[in-house]
């Protein structure tokens, strides 16, 4: 599982990319400020889809040497 629904300190929900530790983005929309139901549904959808089709990285992926 790469994406998780997480509650933020303001009691809103977001979908977190556990690899980058940043909010996930689908179709140009950051997945923040969601209801619990929306966040869980979108996290499930993101985990089910091929990464290239479901997620656009909000920042360039960098490797650590």
Image (cartoon, helix red, strand yellow):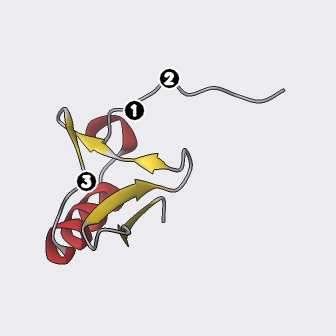
Q: Residue at x 21, y 76 (%)?
A: 36
Residue placed furthest toward the right: 65
Q: Is residue 9 above or below residue 25?
A: below
Residue situated in front as seen by the camera: 53 or 16:
16
The numbered dot on residue 21 is none
Quarter of the image for the C terminus: give it: top right
Per the image, label 3 sits on a secondary structure element best described as loop
Quarter residue 15 falls in: bottom left
Quarter residue 14 falls in: bottom left
Label 3 – label 2 distance at C-alpha: 19 Å
Per the image, label 1 sits on a secondary structure element best described as loop
Question: Mark 3 = which residue?
Answer: 32
Q: Position of residue 60 (x, y in %)?
A: 50, 23
Quarter residue 47 falls in: bottom left
Contact (CB < 8 A) between labels 1 and 2? yes
Label 1 – label 2 distance at C-alpha: 7 Å
Contact (CB < 8 A) between labels 3 and 1? no
Q: Residues within 10 Å of mark 3 (few under 14, many from 20)?
A: many
Q: Is residue 17 above or below residue 9?
A: above
Q: Residues within 10 Å of mark 1 (few under 14, many from 20)?
A: some
Mark nearer the N terminus (3 vs 2): 3
Per the image, label 2 sits on a secondary structure element best described as loop
The mark closer to the camera, 3 or 2, is 3
Q: Position of residue 50 (x, y in %)?
A: 35, 46
Question: Mark 1 = which residue?
Answer: 57
Q: Position of residue 10 (x, y in %)?
A: 30, 68
Q: Residues within 10 Å of mark 2 (few under 14, many from 20)?
A: few
Question: Mark 2 = which residue?
Answer: 60
Residue situated in front as seen by the camera: 12 or 31:
12
């Amino acid at each position: 599982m790469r994406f998780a629904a997480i509650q933020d300190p303001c009691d809103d929900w977001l979908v977190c990319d556990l690899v980058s530790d940043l909010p996930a983005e689908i179709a140009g929309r950051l997945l923040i400020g969601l209801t619990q139901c929306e966040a869980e549904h979108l996290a499930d959808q993101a985990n089910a889809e091929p990464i290239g089709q479901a997620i656009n990285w909000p920042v360039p992926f960098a490797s650590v040497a």
